[in-house]
Image (cartoon, rainbow, N blue to C red):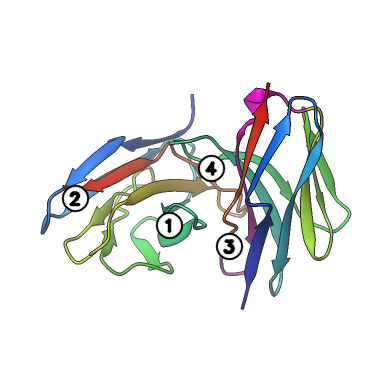
Amino acid sequence: DGGITQSPKYLFRKEGQNVTLSCEQNLNHDAMYWYRQDPGQGLRLIYYSQIVNDFQKGDIAEGYSVSREKKESFPLTVTSAQKNPTAFYLCASSRQGTETQYFGPGTRLLVL
Amino acid sequence: EDQVTQSPEALRLQEGESSSLNCSYTVSGLRGLFWYRQDPGKGPEFLFTLYSAGEEKEKERLKATLTKKESFLHITAPKPEDSATYLCAALLYDKIIFGKGTRLHILP
């Protein structure tokens, strides 16, 4: 079955620690996205990538970093510079030329 | 400023009681309007894309419509399993803007 997987489902971060969230898709989609979801707020775009080895900042990129070395994979690193990382993180992908985005199951990041 | 507003924030209905959710938008250059369903602790599930005013799409008990200022998600004779948060999103030329969602609860 084609789809988007995210791991882990839950992630705990200690103060000063960098953590990486995984996102993999086997839909052969060119574009991939990372969103952050907080209670009572709409989804906010962190980073997106239209093609391999290229990515752009979204609305709230500060404190985050990404890489896109393979078409299937778009990991997100939450760095120690992100002072309020507790949130639900969603990865999405879309086919080139169409913008319907399909989402993964999400990763909930909690701070210890 | 581009904006997408969903109303109501929350809605409780009896099973079988039909209603509509609203998504109003003030944006420049709308290319499309998405509707998603999100269950607690899960990622949004794609429902519909609408591209032009007057367009309608249906899926089971759900029907989405689009005008030049807003979109409606009509739910007919809902069942408890329709309980979820429904998100709309406006696709612009350079970005997508999500609304905050409507939490729908269907009572048996």
Going by the numbered disc 4, the residue's amino acid type is Tyr
Distance, label 3 to label 2, CA atoms, is: 27 Å
Distance, label 2 to label 4, CA atoms, is: 24 Å
Chain letter of disc 2?
A
Residue B78 in sight in this render: yes
| Location of mark 2 (residue) | A19
As drawn, the label of residue B97 is 3
Give the image location of residue B88, x and y in percent: 64, 52
Identity of the residue drawn at 47% across and 33% down = A3
Share a chain, discs 4 and 1? Answer: yes
| Location of mark 4 (residue) | A102
Q: Earlier in the sequence, mark 2 or mark 1?
A: 2
Going by the numbered disc 1, the residue's amino acid type is Ile
Residue B92 in sight in this render: no
Vertical placement of B103 versus A78: above or below? above
| Location of mark 1 (residue) | A51
Which of the two residues, B8 or A41, is positioned nearer the viewer here?
B8
Going by the numbered disc 3, the residue's amino acid type is Ile
